[in-house]
Amino acid sequence: MMTRHTRFLCLVFTNLLLSFGILAQPSDTVWNQTDAMGQKQGYWKKQTQDGNLMYKGFFKDGKPVGKMERFYEDGSRRAELIYLEGTDICNAKIFYRTGKLAASGKYVNQVKDSLWRYHSYYSDDLMYMETYQAGQKNGKSVKYYPGGQIAEIMTWQMDMKHGPWKQFFEDSTIRLLSGYDSNDVHGRYQVYNRNHILVLDGEYDHGKMDKTWHFYDDNGKEEHALHYEKGRLLNNQELEEWAKQHMEEIEKNLGTIPEVDINNFFDRRD
């Protein structure tokens, strides 16, 4: 027979479990329940017409709480979302079909916020980071070479390129120094070769070549100087064609900065 002391201890223990949320959620054997107001309550899951699981998670008063998982058509995990009760915050992990982590970050009010990280499909390498505010890029974005060296740092302001812009070679030396103003290249524009020698030095005025541009050979000796006024060449027109070809040759010799395409980023099928 249970004594008064034993009943008291059982009551205290049960209250402790409730206070920590251990007994707060119903069994996951009951699915897709709504209350009298039509709000989702408890464990929910949704399937496609073919019977494939799309998502499963826990709801309270119509809002997801705790862990929700989303799935690809083949049943592999697509996303793990952790909803913080009483807030509009969701911490997210997105996965490739292979099971490897593709990206991680935070949603606030269902849009990206704060720091997001993107990983290579072919390895675990971090290849891109970007910062959001209320769904818009705001702050630094960073591209990486395979292996982890920084390839490029771009600055954003409310979804527009705005502020310092830097590119680096694989050995972390400077490749390019410039900046943006409201999505236009603006200010001084300097390019260095792999031997750390300045090969191009000019200035942009909101996307238009301006003032004097200096072109150097790979040893740092000046080859030509062209004078611009907001995109209009003031000296020999024949030099303009030479300048275009020379800049193309510089880009070719420098190599490429890794490109990151995050459109359709999370649904790779190969």
Image (cartoon, helix red, strand yellow):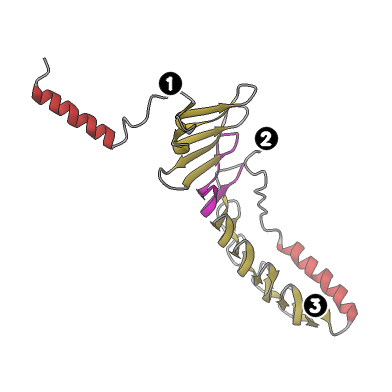
* Amino acid at pointer 2: Arg
Q: Is residue 37 visible?
A: yes
Q: Main secondary structure of the magenta part?
A: strand
Magenta residues, start to end: 95-121
Task: Work out how far the residue at label 1 is from the one at label 3, CA to CA, in angstroms.
Answer: 69 Å
Please name whichever residue, 152 or 44, is drawn nearer the observer in this view of the structure: 44
Amino acid of disc 3: Gly
Indicate the secondary structure of the residue bearing disc 1: loop
What residue is shown at x 59% (from left), y 57% (from top)?
A: 136
Q: Position of residue 201 (x, y in %)?
A: 71, 78
Q: Earlier in the sequence, mark 2 or mark 3?
A: 3
Instruction: Kindly identify which residue carries mark 1.
Output: 29
Q: Quadrant of the C terminus?
A: top right
Taking 112 as reference, is 76 above or below it? above
- Tell me how far mark 2 sits from mark 3, CA to CA: 45 Å
Residue highlighted by disc 2: 269
252 vs 32, nearest the viewer: 32
Q: Is residue 168 above or below residue 121?
A: below
Residue 197 locus on image (x, y percent): 67, 74
**Cα distance in 3D space between marks 2 and 1:** 33 Å
Q: Sort mark 2 into few (<14), some (14-19) or many (20+) by Cα contacts within 10 Å.
A: few
Q: Where in the figure is residue 206, as x and y percent of width and height?
A: 71, 74
- Does residue 167 appear left or right of residue 217 in this picture? left
In terms of image quadrants, where is residue 51? top right
